[in-house]
Image (spheres, rainbow, N blue to C red):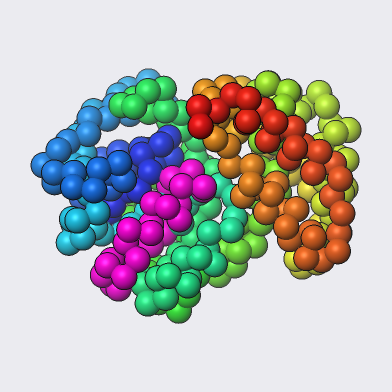
Amino acid sequence: MQWTILGAGAIGSLFATQLLRIGQSVNLLDTRHAQTPHQQLHPMLLELLDGSVCMCELPCIGYRDLSAIGNLLVTTKVWQVIPALKPLVGRLPETSPIILLHNGMGTAEWLLRHFPHNPLLAGVTSCGALKTDSKHIRHTGFGETWLGALNSSGEQCRELVPYLADALGHTAWSEHIGERQWRKLVINAVINPLTAVWNQPNGALLDRTEEVAALCQELHPLLVKQGFRETPETWCRQVLQVADRTARNFSSMHQDIAYHRKTEIDYITGYLLQQAEKQGIDLPKHRQLYLKVKALESTCTNE
């Protein structure tokens, strides 16, 4: 089966190399060059949890190589999704599945409008990976991966699950992928901006539980509107469990600030603020965090 990775960051590179290890055909869609030669190879070195390494070379394709695009796995930064997919509108074969697998929310609506006939899916993963340079990926932890359909055509793509399960460990189909996206969104909306502002690893939240609890309490009315029944205390425990499990890790938002990159704050906290405004709910603590991250972003990005 052919897989195409759009976004060779940490998670995209992890998925690519693990799929290749089980014998799948994998290529990378290079958005930087519209006419990337099909024969160009991108070397990758994957460092596994047991310390062993796996070296491989992945062919790069460009936007003109439409016949070479398989199951399109979109693992770019969320703010890159729409610009990266725009050149494929009206050109990508309608049989090609598109799988969104990124932090944050807010891109699915655009995807449904512009690729209405393609099988469309969303996914969430808690697999851990760190990209130390353009060719070196370190697998930092196993996790769960879930896929679910965004449209009726996407329902026909359950056959993809066993391949990802073989490559990654746990992968399963979810009939409620939107709910899983929201759960991850809440966790990201607490851990990511706090660690970015504090300039500390995820484990720092374990020493500042009052701030975590206050953010979860403030979000609770919005989560009730979304149909969740958990108490603020339950949400707080879930956030702290993730922080404990990933205590030594640095969040992606922290890393973006540290390396002078644009963050995903507009699609994480920004998305929550938009949804809250629609419901007439005020989130002052989250808005304050949002503004702090935007201030850091404006002073450290290369843009």
Q: Residue at coordinates 53% horizontally, 59% vertically from top-left?
A: 107
Inspect this view and state whether residue 155 appears. no
Q: Is residue 100 above or below residue 32?
A: below
Left or right, 117 with reference to 234: left
Q: Is residue 160 magenta?
A: no
- Number of marks present in the image shown: 0
Q: Residue furthest front?
A: 303
Which of the pair 219/266 is nearer the observer? 266
**Image position, residue 19 (x, y; %):** 30, 46
The quadrant of the image that shows the N terminus is: bottom left
**Image position, residue 37 (x, y; %):** 13, 44
Q: Is residue 155 above or below residue 82?
A: below
Q: Residue at coordinates 46% horizontally, 28% vertically from top-left?
A: 130
Q: Residue at coordinates 83% horizontally, 27% vertically from top-left?
A: 208
Q: Residue furthest left?
A: 39
Magenta stretch: give its range. 75-99
Q: Residue at coordinates 74% horizontally, 32% vertically from top-left?
A: 292
**Image position, residue 34 (x, y; %):** 24, 48
Left or right, 286 with reference to 100: right
Which of the pair 220/275 is nearer the observer? 275
Which of the pair 87/257 is nearer the observer? 87
**Image position, residue 131 (x, y; %):** 42, 28
Which of the pair 276/20 is nearer the observer? 276
